[in-house]
Amino acid sequence: MKKSVLIIMVFAMLQLPGIAQDASKEIVTTVGKLDKAKTVKDYQELAVNFLKIAESEKTSWLSWYYAAFCNAKIGWLYQEDGDKIEPFANLANEQINKSLSLLDTAKQKKELSELYCVLAMLNQAKVFMNPATYGREFGPIAFNYIRLAQKTNPENPRALYLLGWEKFYTPKAYGGDKAKAKELLTDAKQKLEINAAVGVYPHWGNMEVMDLLKQAR
Amino acid sequence: MKQVFSLIFIITVVTGLQAQTVITGKVINNKNEPLTSASIRIKESGKGVKADSTGAFRLITSEKGKKVLLVSSIGYTSKELDLLLNDSAQYIKVVLEDEAKLLGDVIVLGAGTFEASDKAKGASLTPMDAVTVAGSGADIANSLRALPGVQQVGESEGLFVRGGTSDEAKQFIDGVLFPNANYAAIPGIMQPARVNPFLFKGILFNTGGYSSLYGDALSSALILETVDLPDKSEASLHLFPTSQGLGFQQVDKNKQRSAGATASYSNASLYNKVVSQKAAYFHGPEYISGDFNFRIKTSKTGILKFYTNYGYNNVGLHTPDIDSSNLLSAFQVKGNNVYSNLSYKESLNNNWKIETALSHNYNKENIQTALLTNEKEKLYLPYSPFREKNDSITNESNFINGKLVFSKRLARRQAFRFGSEYINNTARQSTDSAKSSYTENAVALFAEGDVYISKAIAARIGLRSEYSGLLNRFNLAPRISLAYKIGNGSQLNMAYGIFYQKPAGSFLLQNENLAFTQATHYIINYQVKASNRLLRAEIFYKTYKNLVSTDPLTGNNGDGYAKGFELFFRDKKTIKDLDYWISYSYLDTKRKYLDYPYQLSPSYTTPHTFSLAVKKFFPELKFSANMAYAFATGRPYYDMRTGSDGKVAIYGKGTTNSYHNINVSFAYLFSLFKKWNDFSGIGFGMNNVLGSNQVFGYNYSYNGNNKAPVTLPATRFYYIGIFMSFGTDRRDDFINQNL
């Protein structure tokens, strides 16, 4: 009889709405879609989805982080179309700040490093609006965030990717170094392979690093 | 055991049935199209569903009571609907509106406008883009000649816009007039600009249809906005054969205050010995200038700025006299000018803002003309035309312009502005034989509103009224601009307005009973921006009324029209690190004014004008190269004089050859003294690389038998020099020094 009661209780419980499993299942599937995203439309849809998850899971820094990442990514995809970038860079800024407010910056250093990466990306997106004028103000800010990302977690492959990107695209006369860039990118690639696709924690970067390494040859 | 299963079954069913509401519905847009994969969920509940391919959805919830249903779809504004969940099934049809946010807001800049702002994105112009056009000689008006709507008038400084004279295009700094943008004029030779163009962070160049906040310009307003506080303190110097100067600026630690000054001296006599000029200069050309500025941040949102500029020029030359075979005509001008500008802006409560500015200009020019023998001795012949060739004229003017504007920001980027301005101008002229003067006190009131008529249409509606004490007349000028957003990045603009201008000082000295001259503008423009490229097409029509006529007496019996079509295309993407733009203008204009016997195409206009400006930067070499090519069809010229019957008539006319010109300029950057953190460079360039024989027009002799071409002072112009600045890392800023 005890066993039956147990079974009944379990059955009854299963009928009740609002079980935590559903929400985390959503973020798992959305992050899965993020791994395959390529176009602006993909990232726009994903940003909307992450926002929905963020609104229901009030204490999660992760969904706000992903929404900001998607918007920053759109800014990068539009780098040759400066007129379109601003709304996405602004959205990314709002969202990453929300994520930051939900984080314990003293203890969660690894997570903070990921946020710094997105901050670097959204500021670099602002530079893409018109490098000659916005570069002066937002270029140094982007570079500072890349360095902060690396400092708070030297093993973060995404910080290494951004550092490599910076070294690759800065002209030699202004401190760029294509050889050093290749080193950093190869290091990033290795670290990405070691911590391959683990759950919902940020694990992007493989596609970006491969693309850049191809150009570095 | 059967009992247990029945119990399980009953409990399952009972708990399952407990408080379940089924909500079905459809999500569509305002074109009745289904929004597939729209998201529908109860707010504050994690569960949601997606609409299917027909836009239909089915949401089952156990929630009860008053809840909010959140419906969203990418590209559309989300909607929240109030629900009352009470176990009964519900059907809802949801219509979502297009989300304008991601498409970018409609911007009302109006037709007939080019904005160059340091907030420009994509292929829109920045002040640096405008100023660094090759060969413009650090003169903003000159560099704007590479944009559509402006005529190539090589023998004169200023902006000749869509058939108007340079006098019909006015320059404003921080809202108030800048009356003498160039040094005292010399017939047939362009004079430099007084103010360093790097003082400006925003250039709004109107080729027509400008805002009600500005007036007294029939053709165009060039609206310049000065920079706020600089980033760092620094000292700078430049050394070129024709110009040398120093400057410094100091910013305090808190970045709340700054001050700066520059001084420069220029004398082309050494250069003229090396590169022979058509005119024989006996003095200079010599220019002395100095400026001083301070800027104070009065609060987080307020700033007080002051700028003053002193300029002196002394140029004396002689050319062969056109009315004789062996005499010379001498011309010398000595000019002194002081211009000051004080401006203040501050944000107030409730989204109000105040902007006020005051400009003052004192100008004194002394012009001496003389007839000389071949041995350079003064000669006086008491009969025309030689009698008039010996003269001394002094022009002195004192000008003040104050303006006050209040603006209020309203919802959804709408705004309302109103204000007033005051002008006081005293002008005096004295020649060997006569003296004349006038004093003007003028007031203007203006109001303007930016409204969104619909999500895709924005309008700017304004009204300006002016009163001139000198003319003792009022005027009322309505102005409307419309902008219609067609799609992502493309916009259709229209503008209509009436623009008044007082007759020029020289006419007011003869007759104060003149009326305002008037122009009415109609403009339509289409613009599309995508992928760091910009395309702009514009059609305009202008009518002129009450233009100043001087024959037989000074009056307002002139009129005219101008119509045309312009294209502008800029591409920063196709070739890496290469930035180029093409502009084309077609102009058809005739006017009867001054002593014209009937409507004519003025000699400063031509039907076709084409410009190509190219810039390439080589980051690895720290080298930049700029080229500007201009082409224009020939310009008309006339032998217009009073005949023996006392009437003005045209005794001869023609059209000059087509105009071709290529200018190049280069800059190479380096750092000489690493420990002083300097930023230096060498700049060099050449104007009229092709050495084309540029004839801008002809001057006729008194009897019409002789005509002399108006051409460049020398076939080519060269410059090479060094510039250095200490104290700021300006590596990203190098073009600043590219003279």
Image (spheres, grey):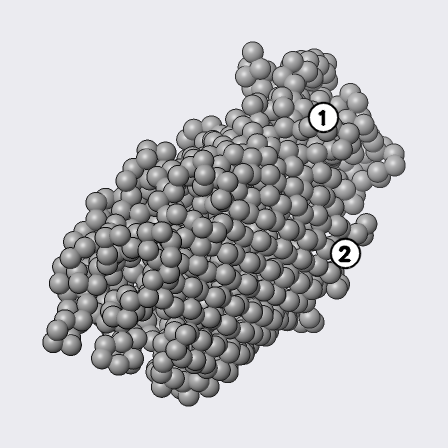
Residue B342 found in image quarter: bottom right
Three-letter code, disc 2: Gln
Residue B54 found in image quarter: top left
What residue lies at 43% left-to-right and 80% top-to-bottom? B435
Q: Mark 2 Cα within 10 Å, few/some/many (few <14, many 20+)?
A: some
B570 up-or-down from A146: above or below:
below
Q: Which quadrant would the N terminus of chain B be assigned to in this image?
A: top right
Residue B539 spot, x, y in % from top left: 29, 57
Q: Nearer the viewer, mark 1 or mark 2?
A: 2
Residue A8 spot, x, y in % from top left: 76, 37
Describe residue B692's horizontal placement relative to residue A54 as left or right.
Answer: left
Which of the labelled discs sits on residue A159, or is there none? 1
Q: Can residue B401 be seen?
A: no
Describe residue B549's horizontal placement relative to residue A155 as left or right.
Answer: left
A119 up-or-down from B379: above or below:
above
Three-letter code, disc 1: Ala
Distance Cα–Cα, label 1 vs label 2: 35 Å
Q: Which residue is mark 2?
A: B256
Q: Nearer the viewer, residue A4 or B333?
A: B333
Q: Nearer the viewer, residue B306 or A132?
A: B306
Which of the labelled discs sits on residue B467, or is there none? none
B226 up-or-down from B609: above or below:
below
What residue lies at 62% left-to-right and 21% top-to-bottom? A172
Describe residue B127's horizontal placement relative to residue A119 as left or right.
Answer: left
Residue B416 found in image quarter: bottom right
Q: Residue furthest bottom?
A: B472
